[in-house]
Amino acid sequence: MKETVIKKSTKVKAVINHDSLLYKVRRDWQLLLMLLPGLLFYLVFRYGPMYGVSIAFKDYGVFLGVFDSPWVGLKHFANFFSNDDFAKLFKNTLLLGTYSIVWAFPMPVIFAIMLNEVKNLKLKKLIQTSSYLPAFLSVVVVCSMAIDLLSPNNGIVNRILQAFGQEKIYFITQPNWFRTIFIGSDIWQNMGFSAIIYIAALSGIDPGLYEAAKIDGCGRMKSIINITIPCLMPTIITMLILKSGQVFRIGYEKVLLLYTPLTYEVADVFGTFVYRRGIIQAEYSFAAAVGLFESLVALTMVIVTNHLSKKASSYSLW
């Protein structure tokens, strides 16, 4: 009898030991196979090229290659920090990133909450579908539309101004209008698509909470303040932390398409500076140093924002 018990316990232990990493891989190989394309993409196009970051510390030569180029240490970083354009680039990048968070980030949240309050399903679907459409347009198309709409000759905005007896405004060449155009076009293009995640979060809120609030005499506004926003808060904070990393990661393509020599003073950012020095002037090592500095600042912003969020609200990414 004792021998039988020992054999059974040994058999159970053998089954438990099979519940290892290898066992799980064999069990879930179909799911892992679906993950493989995304994993390969990041390995090949994100982590693979990271060895090239070392050219920021070298005098890179095209014919010498990454490994044979001479090591110069922090030379390019020192040149960048002592450059006359550094303060201007830092200021412009910081302001555009900050304005994007202050103005562009809340708009999808507000839009999702307003859309959630629409009771007519057909109208709700129409608005939601219409809001997605600009996200499928390329940056080139969006910038071309903005330039055409603001054109001093045939632009509809200037025609409306003239109809009210106002003078034409050369928006694209006016430095004080550049940031408004940049942020405004970004809101129009990305608001609807960015609201998807908030709409999904709203659909997960228990309807019983709203019914109970209605019985207690709460109107729509009080329900939004006391139920909707608190339930959305974890999603909002998570997206805010991720967005904070983009404060210094302004997409240079849109800036290149919208700025002119007359607006360089307020429009030139790290990305456009890297483009000019790295691609046009072929100063690859210097451009890599600037790009690495920009990435390190973005990483620092994410870590700081996550820490502050954890302290203030107990919500964080890690």
Image (cartoon, rainbow, N blue to C red):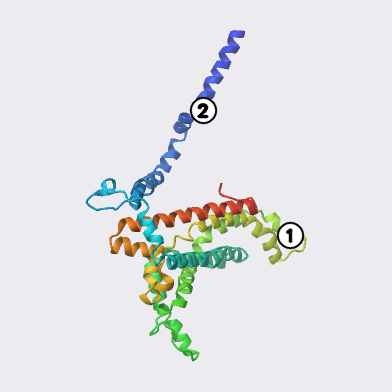
Check residue 19 in the rendering and tell me which mark sits there, or answer none: 2
Judging by the rendered image, the residue that carries numbered circle 1 is: 213
- Residue in the picture at 58% in, 57% down: 236
Residue 28 drawn above or below residue 64: above
Left or right relative to 93: residue 286: left
Q: Is residue 129 visible?
A: no
x then y, percent, for residue 214: 74, 61
Check residue 183 in the rendering and tell me which mark sits there, or answer none: none
Q: Residue furthest left?
A: 63
Q: Quadrant of residue 125?
A: bottom right
Q: Residues within 10 Å of mark 2 (few under 14, many from 20)?
A: few
Question: Which amino acid, mark 2?
Answer: Asp
Q: Residues within 10 Å of mark 1 (few under 14, many from 20)?
A: some
x then y, percent, for residue 160: 47, 85
Residue 179 drawn above or below residue 163: above
Query: Distance between the Cα atoms at labels 2 and 1?
Result: 48 Å
Question: Which amino acid, mark 1?
Answer: Ala
